[in-house]
Amino acid sequence: MLATAGATLAGGALLLRGGVAQAQVAPRPPAPRAGRRDWLAPGMPNRDYRPVIVPNGSKLPWKVVDGVKVFHMVAEEVEHELAPGLKVHCWGYNGQVHGPTIEVVEGDRVRFYVTNRLPAPTTVHWHGLLLPNGMDGVGGLNQKSIAPGETFRYEFTIRQSGTGMYHSHHDEMTQMALGMVGLFIMHPRRPVGPRVDRDFALMLHEWRVDPGASRPDPNEMTDFNLLTFNAKAFPGTEPLVVRQGERVRIRLGNLSAMDHHPIHLHGYHFRITETDAGRIPESAQWPETTVLVPVGSTRTVEFVADAPGDWAMHCHMTHHLMNQMGHDLPNLIGVKPGGLDAKVRTLLPGYMTMGQTGMGDMAEMGMPVPTNSIPMSGARGKHDVITMGGMFTVLKVRERLAGDGDPGWYDNPPGTLAVAANTEELRQDGIDVNAPPKALPASPAGLGQG
């Protein structure tokens, strides 16, 4: 049986042919004796679990062999588009960056064949999973690294539920920075908590791609200039589409090199229901509007989508809402250029001083940028330019949906949209824009409204 959700491997067994070296791979252990098997029948999608939705992403296919779910992962170079107009050469799995999401069920027996088509050795670490020491995937410590051309086998039983991850654990700084990470979703064998209608999975990551370059820089430690959900920076991120009244789960995994990410959702309070160690007891869950996802961790939130609209979801570190061109710029806030621009244009036609009132106007200028780079922020929204980039997406909640594709922009009901105030309503409410009231002192004596 072959899972059909997500990407498929071209040619199936073809990826295992061609004289691929099998050195260093131990013989498969004998099957346990009757009564000694430590796993359950394979969990099936739409019967034992509701499959996750991976915006902009893919899933790793599998087949069942003698009651075991068998996967084939291929570590290889991948050309990937981080945002419209910005393509980079990365390292990933099965032609994908990030790697395809793996989806299993608690109690499944899983077998992973990992073929290395990279120019360097690699391994796979199953981040947050409970498994035998020799399957943990740390090169040199738990196993010999997988040399170029080799295929290794990992096999273990899923003994937990929740959101894990996977990534290379050989030359981690280089290989993870180039994209060798992925999500590992483990559904409970028996449902836990309220049933959800939409289950989204998002990987958080950060990159350094210099304007004009075509390869992420793995040596960067502080100045990352592309921040992504599922390896896409806004405006390349797909929206999260939900029908009003549905219960929603959002899983967030962070394998960024250096930064934690406070992910903020507009319009809703949610409950933090899981960490990477599993479900939080209901009595210990707490309401939030922002969840901090530390490096190397996962967090899961749940809520009922009862408010229709287009709701922003983004990292609340404001520099994480900017793309490439927003770094290494001089601070010109408040500068009054006067006649400087006209004088400079006699030597440099088209020159203009930029940034003295902030960066928002740059989203509308449409100025040319270096080859294979993108403006630092902005995409056209329904009402105006959205002056954000990077780790930003939109939760789109609708009363009715025609399929699961992007429903377009939300039509605000009359009276529910912020608009410019007119003279008559200002007069009726006693608002004089030329003589605004002074702020009151923050003391009990000054709280009267007069």
Image (cartoon, helix red, strand yellow):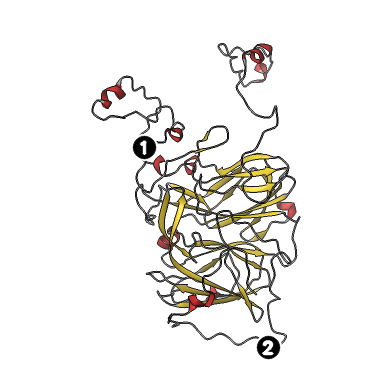
Q: Position of residue 350 (x, y in %)?
A: 31, 30
Q: Report which quarter residue 422 is drawn in.
A: top right
Identify the residue at image location x=68%, y=74%.
Answer: 42
Residue 122 drawn above or below residue 218: below
Res. 329 mark: 1
The kind of secondary structure element at disc 2 is: loop
Q: Quadrant of the C terminus?
A: top right
Which badge, 2 or 1, comes first in the chain's sequence? 2
Q: Quadrant of residue 421?
A: top right
Q: Is residue 243 visible?
A: yes
Q: Quadrant of the N terminus?
A: bottom right
Q: Is residue 258 visible?
A: no
Q: In the rendered view, does 256 fall on the left or right side of 371?
A: right
Identity of the amino acid at label 2? Answer: Arg
Q: Which residue is mark 2?
A: 33
* Residue 347 image offset from top left, x and y in percent: 23, 28
Q: Relative to 397, say whether 89 is above or below.
A: below
Label 1 residue SS = loop
Question: For the residue marked with disc 1, what is the amino acid?
Answer: Leu
Closest to the observer: 346 or 271?
A: 346
Q: Residues within 10 Å of mark 2 (few under 14, many from 20)?
A: few
User: Most extreme residue toward the front, as rendered?
Assistant: 402
Q: Nearer the viewer, residue 358 or 407?
A: 407
Residue visible at 64% across and 71% down in the picture: 158
Q: Which label belongs to residue 263? A: none
Residue 358 vertical placement versus 304 (above, below):
above
Real-space Cα separation, disc 2 to disc 1, in angstroms: 67 Å
Residue at 48% x, 70% y: name it: 74
Residue 11 pos. (x, y %)? 52, 73
Q: Are marks 2 and 1 in contact (CB under 8 Å)?
A: no
Which is more toward the observer, 138 or 42? 42
> Label 1 crowding class (10 Å Cα cut-off): few <14, some 14-19, many 20+?
few
